[in-house]
């Protein structure tokens, strides 16, 4: 068992998942302004520190994905943020891509940038305490998309990123997100997601990435948010499992789903059913942002000094998702 494989398994042990707290300052500004909180560096830190010091961190959160600003900040008690996360029993991680930009040759699609200078940035993040990293590729669905150019270009970038991260002794999270924006059916999502994931693994293997030392972060198989043909939670679980079983090599230790626009309860319920029906050897867990944070953010915004109530709400969501990652959640456990 390699060191990277040990870290990946430790992050996902006993139903633990990942807290995605790597929102860029632009995204975090939108979130804070939606609850009438000014987006200052101090406020962004205060909210995140409140979550990172919650009791559920040790039982439910195996890793926290940070943004560049946050990994370099200190807590109110002058501890470094990565040190706080480690102290709470979790691993600090870092988002290393620099965002999705217009794809030359297909201007309605996106390519994720950030490979230039990445080796040097990774050395810095490792020294700051990061144990794993994240890079997100995004794909939209329509009659023409994702194009072969988009599928190939983003897979290549994800693979080059992963090889550099493993060279730096960290675990790469590979996130190919097929967006739920659009009118497409769940079957179309299934076909496109399968194509995207298979191409990613072709490129990962070509770039000699150790598949036992990565974590895959895919979307679930869902109908588009404007589709008239919604499917049941049971069908979401079955199609998602079928897609991953047919697309992901068995060496991969774990899969952590993104919530991708689902409500908090929906993301938990779908994860629970995926684990109830899981007939693979993969650990299936969560890597949620909004689906872990949104309710806590609303409580915190009403009284930023009310740490206790904010943490109570966050602890509940974290616990619900840890139960779902073991197929043990039920709706009557919700407050």
Image: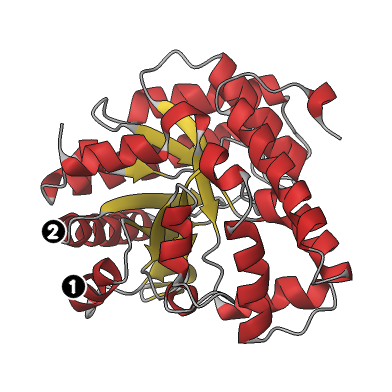
* Nearest to the observer: residue 25 or residue 145: 25
**Residue identified by numbered label 2:** 167
Residue farthest toward the front in the current orientation of the protein: 77
Q: Residue at x 15, y 31 (%)?
A: 1
Tell me which label, 1 or 2, sits earlier in the chain: 1
Q: How is the image coloured?
A: secondary structure
Q: Indicate the quadrant where residue 72 lies.
A: bottom left
Vertical order, 333 against 51 (above or below): above
Position in image of residue 332 (x %, y %): 84, 22
- 95, above or below 232, in the image: below
> Vertical placement of 280 versus 142: above or below?
above
The residue indicated by pointer 1 is 119
Q: Secondary structure at mark 1?
A: helix
Image location of residue 185, percent across then percent down: 64, 37
How many discs appear? Answer: 2
Q: Which residue is more in the foreground, 305 or 95?
A: 305
Q: Residues within 10 Å of mark 1 (few under 14, many from 20)?
A: some
Q: CA distance from mark 1 to mark 2?
A: 9 Å
Residue name at image x 23 percent, y 79 percent: 116
**At numbered mark 2, what does the secondary structure look like: helix, strand or loop?**
helix
Task: Tell me, yes or no, whether the two marked residues, 1 and 2, touch with CB atoms within 8 Å.
Answer: yes
- Front residue of 205/93: it is 93
Q: Position of residue 115 (x, y in %)?
A: 25, 73
Is residue 240 something that shows in the picture? yes
């Amino acid at each position: 068992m390699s060191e990277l494989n040990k870290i990946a398994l430790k992050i996902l042990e006993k139903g633990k998942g990942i807290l995605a707290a790597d929102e860029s300052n632009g995204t975090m500004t939108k979130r804070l302004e939606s609850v009438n909180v000014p987006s200052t560096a101090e406020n962004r830190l205060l909210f995140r520190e409140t979550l990172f010091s919650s009791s559920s961190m040790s039982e439910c959160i195996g890793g926290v994905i940070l943004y560049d600003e946050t990994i370099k900040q200190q807590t109110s008690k002058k501890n470094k943020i990565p040190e706080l996360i480690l102290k709470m029993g979790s691993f600090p991680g870092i988002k290393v891509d620099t965002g999705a930009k217009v794809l030359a040759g297909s201007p309605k699609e996106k390519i994720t940038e950030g490979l230039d200078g990445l080796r040097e940035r990774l050395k810095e993040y490792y020294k700051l305490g990061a144990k794993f990293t994240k890079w997100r590729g995004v794909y939209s669905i329509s009659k023409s998309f994702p194009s072969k150019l988009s599928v190939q270009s983003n897979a290549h970038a994800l693979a080059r990123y992963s090889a550099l991260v493993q060279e730096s002794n960290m675990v790469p999270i590979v996130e190919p997100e097929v967006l739920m924006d659009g009118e497409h059916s769940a079957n179309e999502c299934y076909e496109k997601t399968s194509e995207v994931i298979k191409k990613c693994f072709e490129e990962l293997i070509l770039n000699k990435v150790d598949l036992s030392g990565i974590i895959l972060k895919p979307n679930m198989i869902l109908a588009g948010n404007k589709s008239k043909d919604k499917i049941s939670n049971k069908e979401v679980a079955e199609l998602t499992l079928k897609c991953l079983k047919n697309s992901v090599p068995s060496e991969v230790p774990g899969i952590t789903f993104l919530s991708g626009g689902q409500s908090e309860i929906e993301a938990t319920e779908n994860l629970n059913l995926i684990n109830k029906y899981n007939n693979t050897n993969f650990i299936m867990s969560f890597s949620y942002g909004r689906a872990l944070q949104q309710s806590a953010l609303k409580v915190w915004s009403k009284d930023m000094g009310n740490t206790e109530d904010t943490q109570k709400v966050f602890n509940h969501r974290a616990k619900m998702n840890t139960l779902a990652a073991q197929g043990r959640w039920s709706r009557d456990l919700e407050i």
